[in-house]
Image: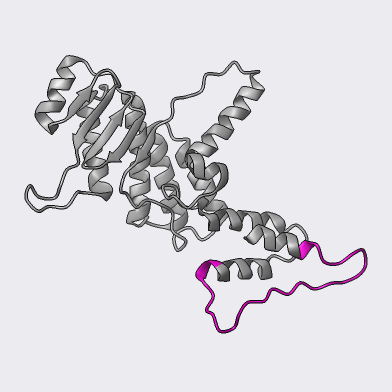
Amino acid sequence: GLSQLHQLRGRVGRGRERAYAYFLYPPDKPLTETAHDRLATIALHNELGGGMHVAMKDLEIRGAGNLLGGEQSGHIADVGFDLYVRLVGEAVSEFKSDGASTPERDVTVELPIEAHLPLDYVPSERLRLEMYKHLAAVRADEDVDALLAEMVDRYGEPPDVVAALLDVARLRVRLRQAGITEVTSAGSNIRFAGVDLPESAQLRLKRVYNGLYKPTTHVALVPHPKTAALGGRPIAGRELIEWVHGVADAMVPAPVS
């Protein structure tokens, strides 16, 4: 790992004695992209205080730069980067208020969606992590609009994967507003959890989406939509996000502003 390489390099030399750290690799085996990134980072940040840059790059390589991916490790792997940031914030707030604050209900979205900040759009890992923190903290569509305006101003028009990331943020706002705590892909169905539906909403869900509601567990199962009735493939990406929005509106109508 990158942090281990940095620690090994820090073990050489004592006092005024100048020392050198050599990292060797087999010349007959091509370096992976990750290995090249690690060595390039070590070579670039060799000044006093460069450990912070190394740590940020290490965090990015291990997956924190992918909001919806499964490449994270440690605590971030267990809960996801956005939830991890929120948990840390809640812990700090609770400490400052002597435990008087009430933790906010989390919204989990696990769907086949490619949504992240690519390197060629936001090159700096520090700025990407900062943007992910802002996305995890949004609580209204206006917050997402402000982030979009900032992205366009700083980096230009966002590519599709970034637009999908903003759509996911808007979806979380809507799900939180509807009281839905979880939307996940479950086989041939999309699972909506944590919502208490009256009988009228259950009938509407059954009629419009052929969905099934389980009142004892507060879970709704809706067949995953396909591109065609016969031989179609399950929809994904931004099209799926828009569909989930529609299901949430059918179960819990959005309040009139």
In the image, residue 52 above or below residue 193? below
Q: Residue furthest left?
A: 230
- Depth check: 25 or 149 in front? 25
Relative horizontal placement of residue 196, taking residue 143 as reference (left or right):
left
| Residue located at (53% from left, 38% from top) | 84
The answer to which quarter of the image holds residue 138 is top left
Query: Whole-percent x and y of residue 139?
Result: 42, 31
In the image, residue 113 above or below residue 124? above
Q: Which residues are magenta?
A: 9-34
Q: Quadrant of the C terminus?
A: top left
In the image, residue 168 above or below residue 29? above
| Residue located at (45% from left, 57% from top) | 155
| Residue located at (36% from left, 32% from top) | 173
Query: Whole-percent x and y of residue 196?
Result: 28, 18
Magenta stretch: includes residue 112: no
Query: Whole-percent x and y of residue 145?
Result: 38, 40
